[in-house]
Image (tube, rainbow, N blue to C red):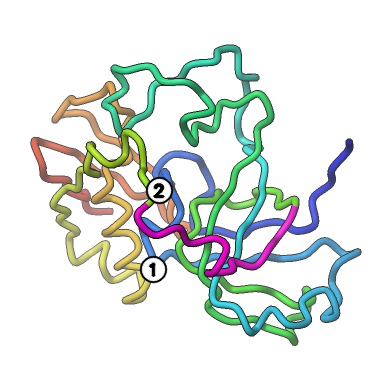
Amino acid sequence: MEIKPVAVFRSPFTSKFGIPKQSGLVKELEGEIVFESAYRNADALRGMDGFDYLWLIWGFSANRHAANSLVVRPPLLGGNEKVGVFATRSPFRPNPLGLSSVRISHIDWHDHRGPVIHVLGADLMDGTPIYDIKPYVPYADCHEGARGGFTDSHAIRRLQVDIPPAVVGHFSETQLAALRKTLALDPRPHYQNDPQKVYGMPFEGRDIHFKVEDDRLTVLDD
């Protein structure tokens, strides 16, 4: 079976570094779904405005190396414990496909790029190919009381985040909230813990540099 993208995702993140590791963790993150020319037709989205959430099936297009192991080390487990690849959402998979649930903010039916879906809470990099879009259906997709495996016993660690006024001024209120919550998730590789090391990531067209010491992340002035 050959699959081709139906759309491309537009995101504040132009690299993998810093992107939340799951959709919905940063609900303020704004993104756009821009369709390929063959699908820039309002008929393809007819009825979508009656749904709140979508499932996106997309490709890990920035992975440079093919998966070569059936076990992975989830960051939630500190990168120290191996579990089976099919028991995780690791991007390093036999078929590099991702699955994300995103909230529909609104649909711009009159954009010059064709109908554009504006969404919130995505974990996709800018330029990510989207292979399919399906509506989230509560009666079928929500399973109350379902177990979450190792995610039930390992809480997500969040940092305190300090952002100086010089950096705050570059962003809107919504963008700043998204940046703060993204940084709070600790974008660093799980094996690095050097308080003197300066890390950097692109966000909304700007380079964000920061340090982390203990449970506090400090963004550096421009």
Q: Which segment did they paint magenta?
A: 132-145
Q: Residues within 10 Å of mark 2 (few under 14, many from 20)?
A: many
Q: Residue 12: where, in percent of width, then height?
A: 49, 58
| Residue positioned 69% across, 29% down in the render | 95
Residue annotated with mark 2: 20
| Residue positioned 15% across, 56% down in the render | 162
Residue 11 as seen in the image, left or right of residue 165: right
- For residue 43, what is the image quadrant? bottom right
**Residue 140 drawn in magenta:** yes
Q: Secondary structure at mark 1?
A: loop
Residue 103 as seen in the image, left or right of residue 185: right
Q: Residues within 10 Å of mark 1 (few under 14, many from 20)?
A: many
Residue 5 as seen in the image, left or right of residue 184: right
Q: Residue 6: where, in percent of width, then height?
A: 80, 57
Q: Amino acid at mark 1?
A: Glu
| Residue positioned 91% across, 64% down in the render | 38
Q: How far is disc 2 from disc 1 in space, using C-alphas?
A: 12 Å
Placement of 43 over or under 176, stated as above or below:
below
Q: Amino acid at mark 2?
A: Pro
Residue annotated with mark 1: 28
